[in-house]
Image (cartoon, helix red, strand yellow):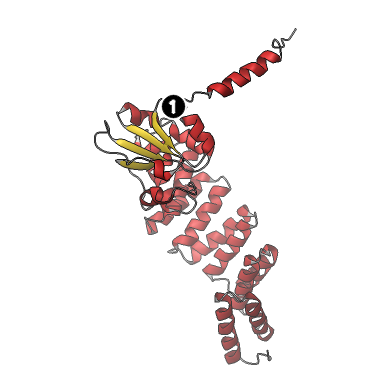
Amino acid sequence: MGRVTNEHDTAGVFEAALRAQRGGDYDRAQQLLRAVLAANPRHPDALNNLGLIAYRAHRHAEAVVLIGQALASAPGRAAFHNNLGVVLSVSGRRRDAIAPFRRAVAAAPGNAAFRCNLANALKECGEFAPALEAFRAVTAIAPDYGEARFGAALCLLAAGRHAEAWPEHAWRAVAAGLQIPANGGALYEKVRARPAAPLSGELAGRHLLILGEQGLGDQLFFLRFAAALASAGAALSYFTGDSRLARLLARSRVLRGVYLEPREVPPADVSILAGDLPLASRSGDATPRPFDLAPEPSALEAVRSRLARSGPPLTSA
């Protein structure tokens, strides 16, 4: 392309670069942005956008330099500070990201996303008390900000404040990152649409379907809260995408049925995510004893046979 020679040309070329960037033509966008910088080396938006393209290509060190140059030209731009924080955080420099996130919040205190980024950086650095305060500041602006509500739950759990944490923990269902079985489909649609609440009314005789989520260890932890619901008379079924867990749970005295396929699941009065069992059972700060699991008889016998073949146990002198 020809040389950009005046401010009018620069504005037009920058708009063309934006269109290319938004359309996914990053090579063309970079070419146009560098033409803008040839005419005005301190053009803050061109520097910032080149930094974003470098970030998208995982060239994090280059992105930090470019966005830093954008800030040198326009130090009051909150979005630039936030962008720098994001790049530093993603590249593993989470503690370094805190300062630019703080500057973004100072420049745009009403921006909930900037505040949430600061809160997450503090949480990831183990600074749970200030992180909780920062998450609370997000929800003061945007009460339904699921990521911030869930982040607050993690901070509260880390502090042992379980009774306060479980209602916030329910917001993970509307935030990104809920890990569910690939074949769960429609079983999970309703429970993901809104945060859970404690179960109300008489439980005796009601069929509760517990929907497994997260990893094997998480599911085993949350299942310890199921016994209280069974004791209240609820009939409990469990759906999981993990065949290992299904085999373990098949011999449980607490669960009436364990299912790996949605088509096998009988109609339920209530469906609940496994991670919401503490809230549903109104456990407060208490953590029940581990879920009772009976070993598979054939596996247990195999272990006993191996031990018998190995001879008597060794003893110290």
* Residue at the limit of the structure toward the right, as seen here: 317
Q: Residue placed at 57% from the left, 91% from the top? A: 8
Residue identifier under label 1: 252
As drawn, which residue projects farthest toward the front? Answer: 263
Q: Is residue 186 left or right of residue 104?
A: left
Query: Which residue lies at the image location 49% right of the left edge and 23% below the top edge?
Result: 294
Residue at the (40%, 41%) spot, across then down: 264
Looking at the image, residue 34 sits to the left or right of residue 157; the answer is right
Q: Position of residue 141 (x, y in %)?
A: 39, 59
Rendered position, 258 above or below 168: above
Point out residue 200 in the picture as x, y percentages from the top left corner.
27, 38
Q: Where 121 sits versus 248, above or below?
A: below
Q: Position of residue 85 (x, y in %)?
A: 58, 61
Q: Residue furthest top?
A: 317
What residue is rendered at 60% in x and 74% in y? 49
- Front-most of 203 and 82? 203
Q: Nearer the viewer, residue 245 or 176?
A: 245
SS for dot 1: loop
The quadrant in which the C terminus is found is top right
Residue 246 appears in view: yes
Quadrant of the image occupied by residue 56: bottom right
Give percent across and percent down for residue 81.
Answer: 57, 65
Closer to the camera in the image, 195 or 207? 207
Q: Assign the N terminus to one quadrant of the image.
A: bottom right
Q: Judge the density around disc 1: few (<14), some (14-19), many (≥20) Cα neighbours within 10 Å.
A: some
At label 1, the amino acid type is Ser
Quadrant for residue 222, please give it.
top left
